[in-house]
Image (tube, rainbow, N blue to C red):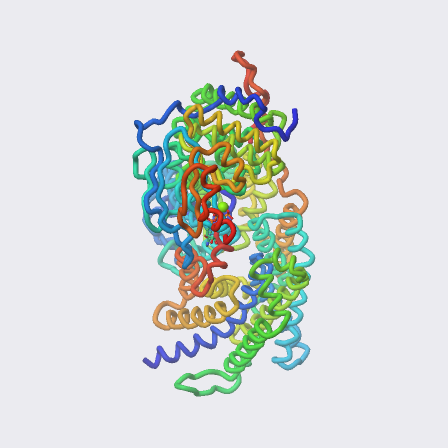
């Protein structure tokens, strides 16, 4: 029983990072309708930028914010420089997937070229151990969880309470219609890529804090559970991704407590395949989302 | 030859290329019988208990306001989506559970409301591909190679050319279908359906977007085809067209058939007028 | 293979490689230390290659089945990527099965009893032979009416089904044939390099394959066979040897992969049809009553 409780605690902590990443992934997909496979590599970029800034002696949480914003900027450049022109040229979705795969690999090996292929670490940043509801968690885990909660709340308020948020949701639901209603959809899409990149970078740094060591493949390995979280919640649905992240986090953590941890990602993999075959719109997806996903 | 012309005024050539088998295949019964058909999308009852029969060699129209469920009926009958209730009999055989391609092979062929052509193929290839049980696509054809299917291929090419000529599109034969205009795509789609030697043709708003002259020409094509024994179920908003070519008309609203009969008579009926005004 | 499934093609190649490996390794003779001997068979070369083709076809069909669901192309592509990453992860995580992370090694070379130079040439000749066969088989599928039907299906599966094509049957058929190709190419690859491990078919190798196909020209069977067959062998083999040539910190390798990624993007941007573009046959008007009428120029598609 104790093992179960403890592994759920770890799952929630891991799920917070996952939710952060998955929300970014899903937000950008929902609004620009492009599956960005290079998202994982952008996450690695974030982690390595963080490493660099830590080397400059900056505070870890400041690093997380700056790193997030920097990756957000990269993400906008990726959209403006590569994705938007190709979409304008009429490239098919499948072609765009290959482009983002390629872009992701280029990004990863830029990291290798600059920082080398070696395994890196942020050092021990976990802080004091806290006991809480029978869970033993590190300060870092708790802070990251809090940051994730704050960001999600912020996103929720943005989407529901502001003009920008309404414009974003309108664009996500029907881009052409939104444009004909006078919404500058390309600017909305830039903003979505920026926010997505920011979430991505912060998730990358958060991940680097919580695991002992990482290399340039950090993000692309993490991409699978992130996709699982997004798919579980319904791709394009930010709230779905938040919950999906927690679920995937807890399920993988519990399964690796009772089963071989080497198979942890297999759980995520299983979730993706089963969801896509059985209910592609995800647990919380609407009928509109279905129409968007069916060929 | 004008690329916009489909089916010259003297539609005699259609007679030569027509692919419809003469007369109904299964006795004298109705070619299609639809009973209590229903289809729901989530909570929306797009089609809600529709029954009708089509006689061989007739053109039947479906009219009704937008969202009445016309396309849904056609889509369900073609097998593209399955009904939530009801049965569909084609040529006396229950086809409710049959996949779309099997129905097509039996001669139940549809076109789409938004014309769907194979964009990467040329116009004439679009026609030539529409013979699903050609020898070249069997395992034997793959093993036997060109010698095995050459003569059949030649016949297919001749039929395709004849149709292209009839529809006045011979000069576009080797044009990539993705580059054709909306009207030309529609023509390609109809020719493609005819290549399959259908027994019942389901067409969804074939006249939409065609100019009046082309509309009249297409009407002639349909009438000629009917004379050769083809049955047609046509969804159409242009009531004059419906009046000219359809012997029977079903009026749909809110997923139900609210009236049926001849167009001229239906025009005078109050419930039909109401449905159009309210819908 | 239909476009999307190419993203998991590496899995098929790996299946062929493993099949060939475990069928030719022979029983444990106690010389390899940690080496895993899974089945202990030592089949002759050709039988093992045929087995690899069969396994490749089966795996190809299995992958094809996941693609049958009517979901968006890019979504399917994502599934394929996930499948290919996961296959490597699962096998890497299970040391008792197929050698785990270290993989299989000491796979006997079919030309071991020839001198090294002759052996290499024999290998080249064999690959060339396989390419010719592959090209001929591929042509059967991509030229003439069959190619036309497959291209139609690629363009719009629903419309193809509306025309009476059994899309499922055709999709699985092409998957099986494509899978058999992949299986053979995996077997030939592993017969030459003598070892195979999950590291040899990770994420980036998928890109290498894709680049080959895209550069070759997706819609041209000559381009594709050149791509998935020859270049697949060369590239994967090159990747195997690269780490031994490089002098420091993986810079050469990084530059190699970056070039590959940039090349793919550049091609998709500037020449999406590839070096060899898809050829559409032109049909002339058949002269009525003249037996010689018909196609004037039938190029392969
Ligand atoms: N894929 C779908 N998902 C959900 N609802 C649908 C779907 N397709 C159609 N509907 C709904 O079913 C109802 C009937 O639609 P249908 O397309 O059959 O109408 P229609 O009579 O063909 O209209 P129109 O004349 O505009 O073509 C409509 O209310 C529509 O919103
Ligand atoms: Mg309609």
A167 vs B260, left or right, is right
C83 vs C260, left or right, is left
Relative to A208, does residue B26 appear above or below in the rendering? Answer: above
Relative to A75, does residue C17 appear above or below in the rendering? Answer: above
Q: Examine the image and state in which quarter residue A197 appears.
A: bottom right
**Residue C177, position as x, y percentages in the image:** 43, 38
Relative to C39, does residue B127 appear above or below in the rendering? Answer: above
Q: Examine the image and state in which quarter residue B5 appears.
A: top right
Name the foreground residue: A52 vs C145. Answer: C145
Visible residue check, residue A146: yes
Name the foreground residue: B257 vs A15. Answer: B257
Report the residue at 62% width, 52% height from top: C261
**Residue B246, position as x, y percentages in the image:** 46, 34
Visible residue check, residue C180: no
**Residue C287, position as x, y percentages in the image:** 56, 15
Q: Quadrant of the N terminus of chain B?
A: top right
**Residue A78, position as x, y percentages in the image:** 66, 59
C66 vs C295, left or right, is left
Name the foreground residue: C76 vs C271. Answer: C76
Report the residue at 57% width, 70% height from top: A204
Report the residue at 48% width, 27% height from top: B223
The image shows a total of numbered marks equal to: 0
């Amino acid at each position: 029983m104790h093992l179960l409780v403890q592994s759920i605690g770890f799952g929630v902590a891991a799920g917070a990072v996952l939710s952060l990443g998955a929300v970014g992934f899903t937000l950008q997909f929902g609004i620009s309708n492009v599956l960005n496979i290079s998202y994982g590599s952008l996450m690695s970029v974030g982690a390595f930028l963080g490493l660099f800034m830590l080397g400059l002696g900056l505070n870890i949480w400041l690093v997380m914010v700056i790193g997030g914003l920097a990756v957000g900027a990269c993400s906008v450049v990726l959209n403006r420089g590569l994705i938007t022109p190709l979409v304008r040229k009429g490239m098919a979705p499948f072609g765009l997937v290959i482009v983002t795969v390629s872009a992701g690999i280029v990004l990863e090996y830029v990291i290798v070229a600059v920082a080398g292929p070696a395994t890196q670490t942020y050092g021990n940043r976990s802080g004091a151990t806290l006991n809480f509801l029978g869970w033993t968690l590190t300060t870092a885990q708790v802070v990251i969880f809090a940051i994730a909660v704050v960001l999600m709340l912020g996103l929720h308020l943005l989407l529901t309470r502001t003009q920008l948020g309404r414009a974003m949701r309108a664009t996500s639901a029907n881009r052409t219609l939104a444009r004909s209603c006078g919404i500058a959809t390309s600017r909305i899409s830039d903003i979505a890529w920026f926010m997505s990149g920011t979430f991505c970078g912060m998730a990358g740094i958060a991940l680097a804090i919580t695991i002992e060591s990482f290399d340039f493949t950090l993000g692309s390995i993490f991409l699978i559970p992130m996709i699982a979280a997004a798919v579980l919640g319904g791709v394009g649905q930010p709230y779905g991704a938040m919950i999906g992240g927690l679920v995937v986090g807890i399920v993988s953590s519990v399964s690796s407590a009772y089963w071989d941890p080497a198979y942890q990602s297999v759980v995520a993999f299983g979730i993706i395949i089963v969801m896509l075959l059985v209910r592609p719109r995800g647990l919380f997806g609407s009928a509109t989302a279905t129409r968007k996903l069916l060929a | 030859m004008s690329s916009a012309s489909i089916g010259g005024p003297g539609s005699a050539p259609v007679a030569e290329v027509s692919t419809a088998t003469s007369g109904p295949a299964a006795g004298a019964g109705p070619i299609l019988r639809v009973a209590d058909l229903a289809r729901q999308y989530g909570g929306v009852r797009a089609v809600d208990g529709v029954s009708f029969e089509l006689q061989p060699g007739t053109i039947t129209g479906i009219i009704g306001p937008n969202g009445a469920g016309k396309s849904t009926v056609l889509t369900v009958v073609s097998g593209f989506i399955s009904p939530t209730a009801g049965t569909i009999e084609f040529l006396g055989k229950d086809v409710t559970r049959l996949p779309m391609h099997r129905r097509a092979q039996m001669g139940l062929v549809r076109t789409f409301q938004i014309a769907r052509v194979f964009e990467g193929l040329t116009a004439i290839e679009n026609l030539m591909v529409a013979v699903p049980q050609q020898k070249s696509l069997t395992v034997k054809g793959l093993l036997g190679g060109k010698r095995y299917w050459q003569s059949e291929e030649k016949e297919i090419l001749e039929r395709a050319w004849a149709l292209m000529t009839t529809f006045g599109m011979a000069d576009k034969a080797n044009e990539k279908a993705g580059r054709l205009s909306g009207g030309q795509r529609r023509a390609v789609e109809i020719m493609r359906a005819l290549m399959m030697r259908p027994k019942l043709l389901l067409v969804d708003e074939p006249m939409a977007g065609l100019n009046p002259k082309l509309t009249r020409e297409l009407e002639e094509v349909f009438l000629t085809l009917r004379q050769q024994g083809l049955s047609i179920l046509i969804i159409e908003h242009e009531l004059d067209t419906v009046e000219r070519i359809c012997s029977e008309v079903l009026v749909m609203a809110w997923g139900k058939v609210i009236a049926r009969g001849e167009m001229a008579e239906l025009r005078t009926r109050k419930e039909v007028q109401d449905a159009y005004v309210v819908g | 293979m239909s476009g999307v499934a190419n993203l998991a093609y590496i899995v098929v190649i790996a299946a062929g490689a493993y099949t060939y490996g475990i069928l030719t390794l022979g029983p444990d003779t106690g010389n390899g230390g940690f080496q895993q001997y899974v089945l202990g068979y030592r089949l002759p070369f050709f039988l093992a290659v045929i087995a690899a083709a069969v396994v490749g076809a089966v795996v190809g069909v299995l992958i094809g089945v996941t693609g049958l669901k009517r979901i968006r192309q890019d979504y399917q592509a994502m599934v394929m990527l996930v499948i290919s990453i996961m296959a490597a992860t699962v096998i890497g995580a299970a040391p008792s099965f197929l050698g785990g992370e270290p993989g299989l090694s000491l796979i006997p070379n079919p030309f071991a009893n020839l001198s090294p130079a002759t052996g290499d040439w024999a290998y080249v000749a064999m690959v060339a032979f396989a390419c010719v066969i592959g090209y001929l088989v591929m042509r059967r599928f991509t030229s003439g009416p069959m190619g036309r039907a497959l291209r139609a299906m690629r363009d719009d599966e629903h419309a193809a089904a509306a025309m009476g094509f059994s899309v499922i049957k055709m999709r699985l058929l092409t998957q099986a044939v494509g899978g058999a190709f992949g299986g053979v190419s995996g077997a030939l690859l592993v017969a030459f390099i003598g070892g195979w491990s999950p590291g040899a078919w990770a994420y980036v190798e998928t890109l290498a394959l894709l680049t080959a196909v895209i550069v070759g020209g997706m819609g041209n069977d000559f381009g594709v066979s050149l791509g998935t067959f020859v270049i697949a062998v060369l590239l994967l083999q090159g990747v195997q040897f690269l780490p031994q040539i490089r002098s420091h910190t993986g810079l050469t390798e990084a530059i190699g992969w970056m070039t590959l990624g940039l090349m793919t993007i550049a091609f998709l941007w500037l020449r999406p049809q590839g070096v060899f573009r898809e050829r559409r046959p032109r049909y002339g008007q058949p002269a009525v009553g003249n037996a010689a009428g018909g196609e004037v120029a039938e190029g392969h598609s």
